[in-house]
Image (cartoon, rainbow, N blue to C red):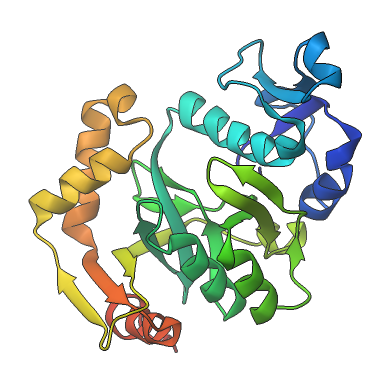
Amino acid sequence: MGLFQAKLNNYPSSISQALKQIYGDCQPKEMSDFTVSLAPGSIVRKFFRPQIVFESNTQIPFKPLPFSQAYALLEWGLNWCLATHDFNHLLLHSAVLVKNNQAVLFPALPGSGKSTLSCWLAINGWKLYSDEMAVINTDSLTAEPLYRPACIKNRSIELVRSWQPDATITKVCSDTAKGDVAHAKFQTWADYSRLESVEIAGIVFPKYDGGLSEERYYTIAKSQVFEELCQHAFNYHVLGYQAFDTVWRLIDKVKVFEVHYSNLDFMDEFLLDEVVGHGA
């Protein structure tokens, strides 16, 4: 995962290809932060509607899922490992996109188009630091990169393929709680290794609406932004005052917008004009 490392002890051969696609070029460290495994469910289930179980350091945080959803379960399990064990950073449910050495956070609820927007930007000149989790240094207020794929769902899977026909995308896991799910890789390990912590320039709450006749954007009151970010934080309750202070200092420092859009080109232009600048 880059900033952290997980050791996968046991997994079904059915996900070998996906692991090679996403993490095959990763250079492991000697020590691991987490030890995880994917194992079959009960013996009865081995032959009748087989299931898969995610385990991390003897903990089983999720109910078993259908065996066909093993790779999606692994990625969700890795998210859980980070969210429940990293107390040195503020962790937000947010995408992180970087351009001109400036980061933009996209905290958003499911259905907002966050992942689709993130993939489109990643294909069009932005660096994808994270699709699901913003890792924020509580002292410097900088964003850290994660070596993780983007989780794409349903219609977005074909959209990403149409935007980048040679994109590295795993086999689709069907009928999950989120619908059809696949994972897309947008940078090599060598590319990731060159990434550094970056200043956060803005927080944008994206809301996709295909029926819009004209894009709209708004500034948001700091009190509302504070409440939103606290709700999007995985470890706010653990960090306590440190999380409160980090969120408030971040809001006081960066630009914040809510953007309603139907056009992805508009989002690229908006972010360059209003948030990160066009660079040198």
Asked if residue 10 lies left or right of residue 165, the reply is: right
**Residue nearest the observer in this picture, 233 or 168:** 168
Q: In percent of the image, x 83 and y 28: which residue is there?
A: 11
Q: Farthest residue to the right: give it.
A: 13
- Name the quarter where the C terminus is drawn: bottom left
- Name the quarter where the N terminus is drawn: top right
Q: In percent of the image, x 47 and y 25: which residue is there?
A: 84
Q: In percent of the image, x 40 and y 84: which residue is there?
A: 263
Residue 135 higher or lower than 32, as above or below: below
Where residue 153 sits, quadrant-wise, is bottom right
> Looking at the picture, how far across and down is residue 261, in whole percent?
32, 77
Q: In percent of the image, x 82 and y 10: which residue is there?
A: 43
> Looking at the picture, how far across and down is residue 82, in whole percent?
53, 32
**Residue nearest the observer in this picture, 191 or 230:** 230
Residue 6 higher or lower than 150, as above or below: above
Where residue 63 sits, quadrant-wise, is top right
Q: Is residue 24 visible?
A: no
> Looking at the picture, how far across and down is residue 53, in whole percent?
70, 22
